Image: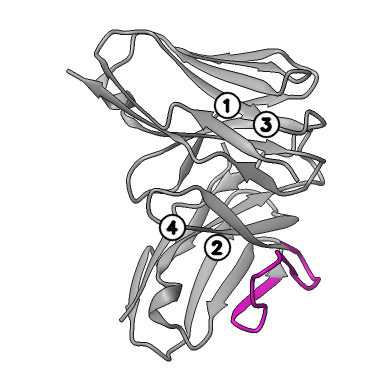
């Protein structure tokens, strides 16, 4: 059974700092991995999707990497801003069209 | 990106009543829709997977007679919580994907529905 773990559970940083969020999964046979952002009481916003054949994806200040063989992904946020404060979730899809298995998220607070 | 809506965004009901939540894909055809439940400060737990025109596949431990899922069209799926009780209070989120045309099987999430059962 696939299990997804995110470390740390919570992170508080000053504005402007670069930071890394970690995600690990137990079964490396995945189809893709997604990073999401969730604001309190809201739904999920997709940030980046990495297919199993890819090693990284970039969007603006965000960069996500994937090391499938070791079962790890990282989300790098450059020059953090207070507006980045949210919970970040990673999720893996094991086969095409199948369920997403989510980690418990990292709650990020960026202090002005 | 693709847009998924949910209605209502928030509902409060009395114990014993039934509540219907709608999930719509606004600008694409959703061959598959997923229903998740999220407890406070916890991650999303998949409840069921529904494909258009067929019966939903429920996850272990989810009562199919309590959580009725209908996916009658390519743009609409509904979740009905029957005879709701306080323990059913939660945040329900749907997602949708178009497996016919999508290259990467990305799931697009709705904004969620907060259900409170008194």
Chain at tag 1: A
Instruction: Specify the label residue B23 is tagged with.
Output: 2
Residue at the image point whose x is 71% and y is 66% from the top = B60
Chain at tag 2: B
Residue at the image point whose x is 75% and y is 20% from the top = A68
Whether A66 is drawn above or below A100: the answer is: above
User: Could you tell me if the residues under marks 2 and 1 are in contact, i.e. CB atoms within 8 Å?
Assistant: no
User: Could you tell me if the residues under marks 2 and 4 are in contact, i.e. CB atoms within 8 Å?
Assistant: no
User: Could you tell me if the residues under marks 1 and 3 are in contact, i.e. CB atoms within 8 Å?
Assistant: yes
Inter-mark Cα distance, 3 to 4: 22 Å
The crowd level at tag 1 (other Cα within 10 Å; few <14, some 14-19, many 20+) is many
Q: Is residue B115 left or right of residue B103?
A: left
Chain at tag 3: A
Do marks 2 and 1 both belong to one polypeptide chain?
Answer: no
The crowd level at tag 3 (other Cα within 10 Å; few <14, some 14-19, many 20+) is many
Residue at the image point whose x is 49% and y is 88% from the top = B83
- State which mark lies toward you, 2 or 4: 4
Stretch in magenta: B50-71
Inter-mark Cα distance, 2 to 4: 19 Å
């Amino acid at each position: 059974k696939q299990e997804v773990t995110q470390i740390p559970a919570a992170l508080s940083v000053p504005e402007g700092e670069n930071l890394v969020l970690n995600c690990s999964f137990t079964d490396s046979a995945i189809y893709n991995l997604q990073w999401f952002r969730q604001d309190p009481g809201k739904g999920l916003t997709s940030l980046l999707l990495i297919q199993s054949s890819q090693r990284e994806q970039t969007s603006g200040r965000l960069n996500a990497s994937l090391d499938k063989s070791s079962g790890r992904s990282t989300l790098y946020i450059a020059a953090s801003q207070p507006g980045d404060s949210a919970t970040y979730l990673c999720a893996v899809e094991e086969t095409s069209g199948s369920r997403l298995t989510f980690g418990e998220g990292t709650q990020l607070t960026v202090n002005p | 990106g693709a847009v998924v809506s949910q209605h209502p965004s928030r509902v409060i009901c009395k114990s014993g009543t039934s509540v219907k939540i709608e999930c719509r894909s606004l600008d694409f055809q959703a061959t598959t829709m997923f229903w998740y439940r999220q407890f406070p400060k916890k991650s999303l737990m998949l409840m069921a997977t529904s494909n258009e025109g067929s019966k939903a596949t429920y996850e272990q431990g989810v009562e199919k007679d309590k959580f009725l899922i209908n996916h009658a069209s390519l743009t609409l799926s509904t979740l009905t919580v029957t005879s709701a009780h306080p323990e059913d209070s939660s945040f329900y989120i749907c997602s949708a994907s178009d497996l016919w045309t999508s290259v990467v099987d990305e799931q697009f999430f709705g904004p969620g529905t907060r259900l409170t059962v008194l």
